[in-house]
Structure formats: C-alpha cells, structure tokens
Amino acid sequence: MVINVRSVLVSTACCAGVCAAVVLGGDSVRAVQRTPHTTLAIPGATNSAPSLVVLDRMVVAVWMALKDRAANVYAATSVDGGTTFSEPRRVNDRDGDASANNEQPPRAVISGPANARAITVVWSQRNEGPGRSRRDVVRVARSTDGGQTFSSARSIHDSGLSGARGWESLATGPGGTVHAVWLDGRDADRRIAEAMAQTGMAHKGQPPQDVYHGILTPDGRRVETVIATGVCFCCKTAVAVDAHGTVYAAWRHIFPGSMRDIAFAKSTDGGRHFDPLVRVSEDKWELNGCPEDGPSIAVDQAGVIHVAWATLVNEGEPQKAVFYATSRDGKMFSARARLPTAGITPGHPQLTLAADGSAAIVWDETVDTLRRVSLARVWSGRVIGPAEVLSGNESASNPVIARSGGDLIVAWTSRDDSAIRLRRLNMSR
C-alpha cells in the first residue's frame, strides 16, 4: 500500500501544486520549486524527532511516535524520490522499547546493491534510574525487504553496561559496513568515585560522558572505539564516511573552562583508531550545562568536510546563532560563516550537500513567537541569498535534510498537529 498522507498545499498561490520562487543572491539566481507537503503520522500519537536517509531513488523517513506513554520507532519508505511513501511500519519489535527526544532522533542508513537494499535503524532506549541502576541502551534493527519488516532489536554495545547513553548518529561505509557514533557514560561512576577520593567532594552537575564509535558489519560483528572523553552530556553526535572508508565524527566537547564548543576527529583506518580531536571553532561558549544542540557534518567527493552548528554570540546581549565551516584536511577549519537567521534562539542545524556542490542547511528559529523552519545555502564559503522559510505559518521544529538527485528533501516536526511534515525542493543555481 502506497500513501501520500494528508498532503496540503504550502501556498494558495501555487499552480497545480507547485510554486516557483526566485531568490537573488549577489550574481547568482536560484529557482526554488515548492512541492506540496507530505505528512507522515501515527494516528492518535505524538509524532516527533524525524530523520531522513536517501540512496538513489529510495528515501527512508524514521521518527518517534508516543502514544499511551509508550514510545515506538516508525519507518516509511519511498522508491520514487520522496513523492510517495509506504505505510509506516513499527521498527522496534517490543512495544514501548524506545524513547522520544528531539536531540536523540532515531537514525537510519540504506546499504547494499540496488536489488538487495538493507535498511538499518538505531534508536535510544532510556532508563532514568539513578547512578548504577541506569542502563540506557542504543538499539538497532534491520530490514531486508524495503522496510516492510524489521529484525528483532539488539543493542550495538554490551547490553549490561550502566550509565547514560544515546545521542546517536549513523552512516554507511564501503562494503555495507554501518558506522555508529554515540555518547556513552559507562565509566561515569568510576570517574566520579575517583574524583571524590581525590577531592573529598561530592560530584556536581552532569555525569561524565565519552564519545564512542562502533562498526556494525553485515555479518553482525561489532567493533568499538573510544573517540574522545569528557564530552558535553546531551548534544547529538554527527558522523560521515567517504568512499575510501575514512570516518569523520563531530560532537560538542567540554573544553577547559566549561567551554562547550564543537570538536571533530577522523579515522583513516575505517574507525578502528581516531586522530586527536580538533576544535572546529574557538566559540568559547561557557556553559555549566548542556545546550542540547549538536552539530551536523557532511563530506563531499573532493574530501572537503562541511560542518554546521549553533553557538552563543555576544552582540550587546547574548544570543544564539548558526554557523558553518569547512576543512580540507580535518586538521584546520575555515573561519566560521554566519547563516542569515532572522529569529531568536536559532538552532538544531542540519546540512546536506546539494547536486551543485553547495551546502544546504536547515534550522529552526522563533520569529514573533512562532517556531519555524528555515533553509539557506552556502557556496564556496559564501551564503547565497537570504534564508527561505519552509514551514509557512505552522509551528515547526527540529528539521532534517537529505538530497535525492537534484532535489532536496526536508522533514520537520509539526507542532500544530504532532506530525512529521516533508517537502521536496528542486533548486537550481
């Protein structure tokens, strides 16, 4: 059964369901073809925290649905580039074996040849118990029939580990290997005990966490690596893998002075060892807590690393802003470029690389009390034109973006009806 659920036009000025807008930016002109929204939702549930993944014409959307206090992961697939989607299927085999959190969305990847596509989904299952009784789990399930059915869930780590865990990201590498990155507090109790023994003082604040990388091979083997220790507690991670198998990871780190800036590390041996971390930008966001706003990362065919993130700036009074930077070697990043946000508290940026090589970045921001989703593009380090509002007059948050051929596909959480909204954009320069 193929559905295009509750599609609505984005503007009454659209003709035959498609609007054309021209945005000027210096000497460049881009035409934006707006298609109708598509809505994905489990009836009667609070639907939130979407993710998107694309391979050729196949698009997979995954999200959380909370109903009767039970949170579950759902997936819907498209084989026509995101024009229509299948009926949503529950991913987790045990009802309620998931947790809903916008900074911990379920993640998916597509791997395998065209005639044998596999969909892998990871998500968090949180246990809010204190101290050693807390045993959060990052779960994984796999589909080999286009998302119609999924395997029984298992953990991507030792299921007996204690501590907070999650904020996961996912990517595929050569040969169908799946790479996961997540935050892990398995050593928190030991570190707290050591600190108390040295200082005689009780631990205050969030428990220590590390950032881990895991390799999930097609035959089910798992290999874990610690990328860095002492990371920010609850900002989502980001991971990308290039055609050569080099793994790139980004996260929010705690630098000396409780500076919560973005860190990056890469592995040239498929994720078994990572180089020392690099600070993407000297933002110096001093905060004794977590901003719950992690980075996004992508790598182009030339090996250029693209990163987008939010941080605090001081311009008269402190305010958040969204930035973008690149690196050709993973050792030094360009000066940050500020995106043209228009509202207050912009954040949660996510990026993808458009067909012309530009970076397309989406984020959410509040304008006149309305939370909305906006998009901007960056070409050779220069922002192209003003930002475009994608979510219209509805309340929207936590967008994600992916590329399908020449189109961009954007999804977000609609706060108006607790649903997942998707839109395809055809953008030409």
Image (cartoon, helix red, strand yellow):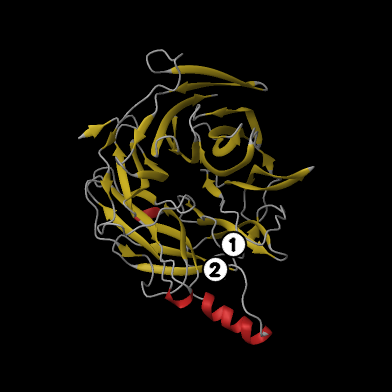
- Quadrant showing the C terminus: top right
Task: Residue at 71%, 58% (x, y): give it.
Answer: 286
The tag on residue 163 is: none
Secondary structure state at the residue bearing disc 2: loop
Residue 425 in which image quadrant: top left
Residue 75 rendering spot, x and y as whole percentages = 31, 45
Report the amino acid beneath label 2: Gln
Choose between 357 and 132: the one closer to the eye: 132
Q: Which residue is mark 1?
A: 232
C-beta proximity under 8 Å, tags 1 and 2: yes
User: Image height check: is 237 above or below 317?
Assistant: below
The tag on residue 209 is: 2
| Residue 15 placement, left or right of 363 | left
Report the amino acid beneath label 1: Cys
Secondary structure state at the residue bearing disc 1: loop
Task: Residue at 62%, 83% (x, y): give it.
Answer: 196
| Residue 51 placement, left or right of 147 | right
**Neighbour tally class for label 1: few under 14, some 14-19, many 20 plus, Cα within 10 Å:** many
- Quadrant showing the N terminus: top left
Residue 252 in which image quadrant: bottom right
C-alpha distance separating marks 1 and 2: 7 Å
